[in-house]
Image (cartoon, helix red, strand yellow):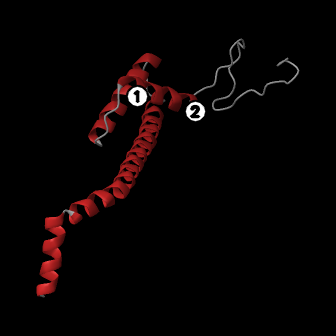
Amino acid sequence: MNKINDIVEWLIQSGALTALFLFAWKFVKPWLDAKASHASAEKAKVAWSLLEQVADISVTALVSQDMTGKEKFDLAVKNVLQSMQSHGFAVNQAAAENAVQYAYEHSPLTPTVVPGNDSQPAQGSVVAIDPKEAK
């Protein structure tokens, strides 16, 4: 037991323990930084996934409401911001607006309008593009 105490005492007094700690820190720090970066990326991924789901739900809930499109959009954005904040995610206005617009455009419940075409296609359907017209 006395030998162990002598060895520990020598490590402390000689500075070998400090040198060992600094040497180990050079290997551990990059690993810790990589872990923190990965955790941050995963949190952002979860936040975006939740944002898309909340926007989709909000758009779906407001499709059949008797309101103007602008009122529906503003209410959907407000709902998305409140829901994200209640889940602990800070989302800016532009991101919420983009998510609601994306959810509206990809919702099967909203009509699709083809520019230059006076007739409306059936809800949730898309008119195929003729390859001859694309040239």
Q: How many angstroms separate mark 1 from mark 2 (CA)?
A: 15 Å
Q: Answer with left or right where residue 111 lies relative to residue 8.
A: right
- Residue nearest the observer in this picture, 43 or 59: 43
Report the disc number at residue 96.
Answer: 1
Residue displayed at 38% across by 26% down = 77
The relative height of residue 59 versus residue 71 in the rendered view (above or below) is below
Question: Could you tell me the amino acid type at mark 1?
Answer: Ala
Q: Answer with left or right where residue 82 lies relative to residue 15.
A: right
- Residue nearest the observer in this picture, 68 or 112: 112
Residue lying furthest bottom: 1
- Give residue 121's quadrant in the image: top right
Residue displayed at 38% across by 21% down = 74
Q: Answer with left or right where residue 79 lies relative to residue 62.
A: left
Q: Is residue 72 visible?
A: no
Mark 2 element type: helix
Report the disc number at residue 106.
Answer: 2
